Image (tube, rainbow, N blue to C red):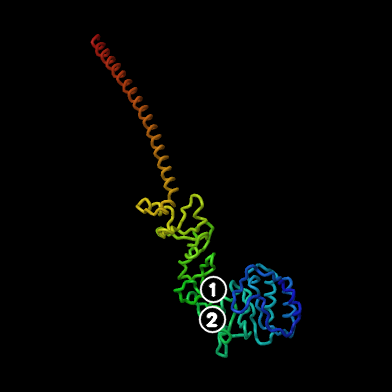
Amino acid sequence: MTGAGLVSLSGSTSIEQIDLSLVGAHQSPILDPKPPLDCDLVLPILDSIINQGRCQLKHLQFPHMWRGGDYDQFNEFLERYDEMDEMLGDGRDVFVTFGDMYFGIQDYTCSECTKYYSSGRDGEDGNALYFCNTCERYHCTQCSAMVECQTCEDFLCVDCIPHTFCASPSCTDIVCNNCLSNKCHKCSKKWCTDCSHICIECDGNGCYQTCCAECSAKEGVNGVHRCDVCHTKLCVECSEKEKVNGVHWCDVCDEKLCDKCRLIGCQGGNNCSVCVKMVAPLLLEENRQLRNEHTNLEDKNNLLGGQNKSLGDEIKRLSDENEALQRKLSVIRMVAADGSGLF
């Protein structure tokens, strides 16, 4: 699907709408894998249409991958398309908005009926135009009912709501796709900001793995667990790395604890055999470290004992020297006393 089949539309003066998004109505425009739609093949065909003096084109929807990618030829086409102020002869003067989310989106035009709203959102017929950030299209209220996201206050189509439901069964909030921030890598369910605690993101260095509580409890899944005590969050793979305070779930006592907190619990009286088994390597390592510390202390004690003996010997030597000096001093004093009587 490179777009070569569109060559039959070259120079058309009757076509009013072209949709290159490759998705149906009210579907996410983000495709994985990306389709092989070729700019070099398609854009010359579009140029041949908009360059016609009798061009009837009212709406053009581009592929998401073009709008979000680095395609110089596409950016140049947008500039040419945006300059076609008079091509429809109905007062339209803005076609493409340059920006982030809206980049490459035809502005002020309903993507369904192709009606142009010259004053922006509100039309003279009482209808209004809204942008849905789930399907990434403009819709007027005559063509599609719109509702407001209860998190960010942006709008989305009623028909897009089933694609944006929060996975929490107790959540009734209507939210747009952008506000479903947490997605489980296993089941692909999404949660709104208020329910994001259900789907946990790993805190491991550069990991960013996310997994919901239900999937994390399944065997063989790289689930993410949060320590019930210190709230450390790590996935299974990161928890198994060396010198990492891993977080593990015990399916016997139903506790999710990091190694350090589990060790403290076992030392404090937690008799769960599975938990004890989990921390056994830590206990062995702690015991080994204590033995090493004991050996080091003994070595230091022996060293200090040797140093103490040397100091004792040195003190005795100095004491002996002091006594010898005292005796010499006494003799000198006696000689000096005897000599004074000769004069």
Mark 2 lies on residue: 158
Query: Which tag, 2 or 1, sits closer to the chain's start?
Result: 2
Quarter of the image where one finds residue 39? bottom right
Query: x, y percentage for residue 92?
Result: 65, 84
> Looking at the picture, does residue 232 appear above or below residue 311?
below
Residue found at x 68% / y 68%:
71
Looking at the picture, tell me which residue is in the foreground, 52 or 266: 266
Circle 1 packing at 10 Å, graded few (<14), some (14-19), many (20+), is many
Residue 88 falls in image quadrant: bottom right
Q: Residue at x 54, y 58 (%)?
A: 206
Three-letter amino acid code at disc 1? Asn
- Quadrant in the picture for the N terminus: bottom right
Q: Is residue 188 left or right of residue 61?
A: left
Asked if the residue under mark 1 is in contact with the one under mark 2, i.e. CB atoms within 8 Å, the reply is: no
Dot 2: what SS?
Answer: helix
Using residue 32 as the reference point, say whether residue 191 is left or right of it: left
Q: Nearer the viewer, residue 69 or 208?
A: 208
> How many numbered marks have been drawn onto this rendered protein structure?
2
Identity of the residue furthest to the bottom in this view: 125
What SS does tag 1 mark?
helix
